[in-house]
Amino acid sequence: MITRAADLAVVGANGGGWVAPVGTAAPDSPLTQPLAPYEPLGAISDDGLTYGFDEDSQEFTPWGLSSPFRTQITKSVRTFGLTVWETSRTAVQSLQYRLDAAVLEPDEDGLTKYAESSSPVPDRRAFWFLVIDGDAYKGFYVPQGEINDRSDVTFKQDEMSGYEWTITTYPDEAGNTVYHVDKLPVTPVYTGS
């Protein structure tokens, strides 16, 4: 008999994302709504959140052997992918166009006017992502992340407009790119099958 436990499988049933300036600490409690300076990213598409791993390695195969006897990781990058649907949120506009939120304040006529630069500058921010499945959850704190890939935006009658982003994580002063806070079911002691 093979041992399986459905309660140990996590489904990303719900979740959210928030953004804050670099240097903002992780939220104190994962299930409490983050406070300012965190700003919500709003509704995320039903594709959810993708946690990506991009790694390269170098294999060392000694003379006379056909398989390596050592492998060295030469690149290890973590990314987060998501599509935000509340494109009119100031925090979301700020991220999409690499602008300070103050630039997006409406004028006396209620109009927001801004320009996109032909020479974008780095725009690192802190991010907090939370994935919830019943009583289980996985939290991801990114002390320094930046949107490095944006998809095209479609404005169409039968399609929701959204900003599809890939956020690359960068190391903080401690050399860490992502901090995890998980509450998962306890794995039962294996007694054999």
Image (cartoon, rainbow, N blue to C red):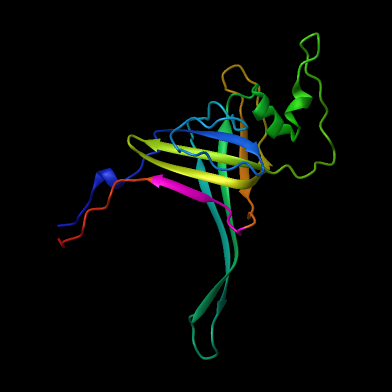
Above-or-below relation of 47 to 157: below
Q: Residue at point 41% right, 46% down? A: 182
Residue 165 included in the magenta stretch of the image: no
68 or 116: nearer the viewer: 116
Residue 63: image x %, image y %?
55, 90
160 or 39: nearer the viewer: 39
List the single residue furthest toward the bottom. Answer: 64
106 or 27: nearer the viewer: 27
Q: Give the range drawn in magenta.
A: 174-182
Above-or-below relation of 85 to 77: above
Q: In this view, does 144 lie to the left or right of 180?
A: right
- Which quarter of the picture shows residue 164? top right
Quadrant of the drawing holding the C terminus: bottom left
List the single residue furthest toward the top. Answer: 109
Q: Is residue 6 left or right of residue 58?
A: left
Residue 22 in view (yes/no): yes
Residue 116: image x %, image y %?
81, 32
Q: Residue at point 81% right, 10% down? A: 108
Total marks shown come to 0
List the single residue furthest toward the front. Answer: 28
Residue 181 included in the magenta stretch of the image: yes
Residue 189: image x %, image y %?
21, 58
Residue 68 in view (yes/no): no
Residue 1: image x %, image y %?
14, 57
96 or 21: nearer the viewer: 21
Q: In this view, does 165 lie to the left or right of 27?
A: right
